[in-house]
Amino acid sequence: MSNVILEVRELTTKYVTRFQEEIYAVDHVSLEVEEGKSLGIAGESGCGKSTLALSLMGYYFPPLHYTGGEIIIDGRSISGMNPDDIVSADLETVNLSSTGWFAPLEDAATAFEPLVRSSENAGPMDASRLRFLADPNDLLTGFNPSGERYALVARVSGPAEAAVDAPDGAGGEHRAGAVEEGINVLLFADTDLLSDRMWVQVQPIFGATAFADNGALAINAVDNMLGNRDLISIRTRATSARPFDRVEEIRVAAEQAYRATEERLQQELQETERRLTDLQAAKGENDLLVISDEQQDEIQRFMDRRLEIRRELRQVQHDLRRDIDRLDTRIKIINIVLVPAAVMVIALAWAMRRRRRQARANAARDVTS
């Protein structure tokens, strides 16, 4: 029986655009590669071949996100998230920086379960190198991946005893061992887990947008420790977005213009190829390898037209960015200037009306008296 060295089960990855659209480039892909054999993947441009390769290597960087599935190499799963634990299940991406790692003791009575693991392109490094580090690129000097996968977040559960003796005067407050159910501890090897730079991006219109699941992981851990499984089932649902309708309309219009221009270029390319084929067919057998003046003129016309259409495509993208920036400016003017001004005008009108009413009331009292 052949040995399977690579197995992919229901792998799903997606791109999340700046408008919070989800584009599934790899959708429930399963495959096997046996030892000594090669697998070729063919498809049209944009069908997801490169994205599949990036996903198999674990290169999940925004806007590419892991959604689900499992990758097994030589019988070992290389997926970073533990899909069986409620804290890490259904999470896509967790960004960590300069982390430590955990490893179980061989004679430990507790159970050690990794929730988030590194890739095999990781390795230990002396922490002293980070103290006077001027250029982060210097870390690559002398770095050799160990090929191991390190536990960055882990759950420790089971029977345990106190590591220190009871202090003097503790009396019955000191517990020498865990309760009958044992301990249930979550360990995180990174103190920068919730730093904004690791999982939050601030945008002019949309405000703070999470591009990783660090916050969801922390909230899941807290909810799990509190014993609330109803809340955690909500936390780990698929992400959703509510973009501005006006921004969405601008984006859709720009995308339609972009696609229309792109389709026009494709049609002109096909027409040029047809003309070149006709010109080639009209030539004699001895001139098949020679490009005629007509063919050169046709190729040059197409090259000039292609440059012009590319400029049109760039202009469409520029107009999209310009329209969004204009909308952003209008929103800022409304929020910063017009709304406070309107509130001030209303307050002044209300104060003047109140003063007039008080003046009329005082005048009526004077007439009565």
Image: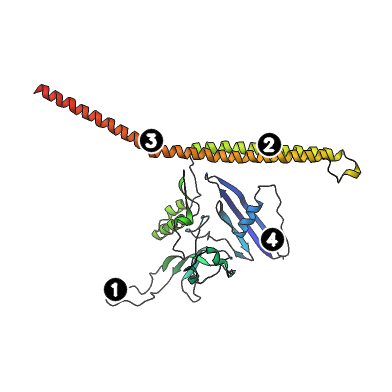
Q: Which residue is mark 4?
A: 33
Amino acid carrying label 3: it is Leu
Q: Local crowd at mark 2 within 10 Å, few (<14), some, or many (≥20)? A: few
Going from N to C along the chain, the mark reached first, 1 or 4, is: 4
State how far apart marks 1 and 2 are (Cα): 82 Å
For marks 3 and 1 on the same chain, the one whose residue lies earlier in the sequence: 1
Mark 3, residue position: 338
What's the mark number on residue 64?
Answer: none
Q: CA distance from mark 1 to mark 4?
A: 61 Å
Spatial separation of the CA atoms under disc 3 and disc 1? 66 Å
Label 3 – label 4 distance at C-alpha: 63 Å
Residue mark closest to the camera, 4 vs 2? 2
Along the line of sight, which residue is nearer the eye, 296 or 36? 296
Q: Position of residue 179 (x, y in %)?
A: 38, 69
Q: Residues within 10 Å of mark 4 (few under 14, many from 20)?
A: some
Q: Quadrant of the C terminus?
A: top left
Q: Which residue is mark 2?
A: 264
How far from the left and from the top, in percent, is residue 366? Answer: 11, 24
